[in-house]
Amino acid sequence: MCALAIGSTAFSADLSPEKWGAQERARVEALAQLPVPPAARTIEAPSGVVSATMSPIAVRAGLEALQQGGTAADAAGTIALTQIATALGSYVSYAGALQLTYYEAKTHRVYALNAGWNSYLGETDPKTIATADQPDAAPGRKTLVPGFMAGLAAMHGRFGVLRFGELFAPAIWYAKNGLTLSPVQAGFFAARQSYLARTAEGRAFMHQASPDHLPAAGDRFVQTALAKTLRAVATQGADYMYGGEWGQAFVAAVQGAGGNASLDDLKRYRPIWEEPLSTTFCGYTIRAPGASTEGGYQILQTLNLLEALKTPARRPYWQEPQTLVDLARVLQFSAADPAMHPAIAGAGAAAGLTLTLQERATKPYASAALPLLDLVFKPGQAPEAPKHSDAIVVVDRWGNVAALVHTINTVLWGSTGLVVGGVPLSDAACFQQARLAALKPGDRVPNEMAPLIALAADGKPVVAIACVGASLIPETARLLLSTLAHQGDLTAAMAAPPLLLNVNFTQRATVHLPASGYDADFLKNLRDLGVTVESKSQQEVWTLKGTAVIAAIDGVKSARRTVELPTVFSFAAGY
């Protein structure tokens, strides 16, 4: 069980951006106008590093937490809270979901925390939940019990040392004082205005920059209602959202929109602490999210299959066509649910495989499954791609490591139009009807998030990776290959062409590649290996690829490293 109230205070800090100074605020706010860092750089620091997707303001806030004596948990919590405020609750949410993998230096243990969605006790017919393209059909049924804030409190309660309420200071400051909208954020409103405009609360949310026009680039977006909500959570603890005033308003809003939420759903919510899943890869131990998730099993299955193919012994995939083919085969196979693909299920049964998630994450399964990799995939239901999210990695002065992913699990505010206390409510149930139908009402909804930590033979962490996006498993796999198998530096690993997941299982031996990622000779060699190459434009790549953050720990040099690149939606800092 998780204590949802405020954790004990070790000492106080002041993380408010007011203390950063006007010049420093101007610097990070100018960076926030860009979708990616302006230049490539490697950050090497003796004490701590942070890296996170999308928000340089949140990275600055996390660095402040480390510099003022906070742990990796304090910094990760500060970053996550600030990411949501600066993203305007669009692709991450205070009413979202969270997954954490954490190495605690003093115990030399790795912990996994699942703060994903719960289904509603009163939702007994989830197959009839409307889809996103039916915005007026009982939008309350499209919501789920959120886990983000409970998960944040659980992480802080176990690993934090700063006062819990102080983690909220940067998010509250930007909610109260406003954020200058970037062109990208202005585009969000232009694309999603019809959904937000469905309700009076949604319209009020949308017009927090100006009462008489759609938010535009350069407008200052002030979130007064959100600031009030965050101050209440900072003061009263996460219980404010799980039975307090916000929780009661959440239930009323969901029920009023045809949903089946109850206050009992919120009060009974508990994050799940569990033993991380584990495998070995290239001589390292990989610790991934635990048994209540799907992402942990999927990444372990992928790594075991790559080892069974002896892929780590080959040159990097961007230099060796056969390595790329191996990766493509394994990734497409790992993404396939055997229950939906009779060719895999039949051959697996003939080979004596049960094809459960647990079995598919083992070394014996990887060896037995090698003959199945080249099966023709028959038409079936493609797996749902993970929706918008943010990723965070932090290493602190004591050697604690946090790898965290959190998400709204939908497309930009979702389609409900529901807003409670400045927090837009996700429609994450509207694409998971089949998954929900397989659960008991009130159960935890499995998630694909897979932040992980790699440990050396002495049990100390060497790499932490957190990925988001449709290709989060491919990106995680390629970064582990690059850093662990090929001992490449972080810049080379992150700068290599992304791997794009092909979830169309009717396309046998088709590899999706960025149009400018490989030369003509490389593409010819791929075709000679019997592979069909389908080029993707840069815009398609941004849609299909995962986005990663990564940190490396060099125990010999006592250094922490991370990286920024102008082709990746992540920012970093260290001290």
Image (tube, rainbow, N blue to C red):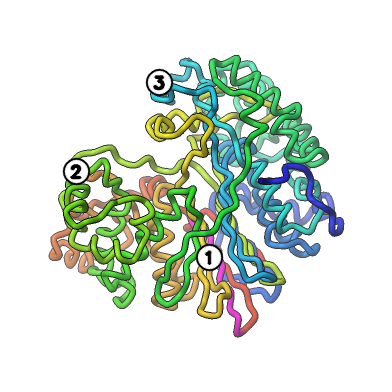
* Numbered disc 2: secondary structure: helix
Image mark for residue 128: 3
Q: Quadrant of the C terminus?
A: bottom right
Rate crowding at label 1 as few (under 14), some (14 to 19) or many (20 or more) other CA atoms within 10 Å.
many
Query: Label 2 amino acid?
Result: Pro
- What residue lies at 50% left-to-right and 54% top-to-bottom? 290
Foreground of the two, 233 or 175? 233
Asked whether residue 57 is in view, the answer is no
Residue 533 located within the stretch drawn in magenta: no
Residue type marked 3: Thr
CB atoms of marks 2 and 1 within 8 Å: no
The vertical placement of 267 against 312, above or below, is above
Question: Could you tell whether 409 is left or right of 95 in the image?
Answer: left
Closest to the observer, 212 or 280: 280
Secondary structure mostly seen in magenta is: strand
Q: Which residue is mark 1?
A: 453
Report crowding for label 2: few under 14, some 14 to 19, many 20 or more residues within 10 A (C-alpha).
some
User: For residue 550: magenta?
Assistant: yes
Residue bearing the label numbered 2:
342
Instruction: Bin the neighbour count of mark 3 within 10 Å (Cα to Cα): few under 14, some 14-19, many 20 and up.
Output: few
Q: Residue at x 42, y 33 (%)?
A: 432
Per the model, the C-alpha gap separating discs 1 and 3 is 39 Å
Residue type pointed to by label 1? Ile
Tag 1's secondary structure? strand
| Residue 147, quarter of the rendered image | top right
- Where is residue 401 shown, x and y percent of the image? 62, 65
Whether residue 352 is visible here, answered yes or no, is yes
Magenta-colored span: 548-556
Q: Does residue 530 sit above or below 107 in this rendering?
A: above
Q: Secondary structure at mark 3?
A: helix
Residue at left offset 30%, top offset 40%? 382
Q: Nearer the viewer, mark 2 or mark 1?
A: 2
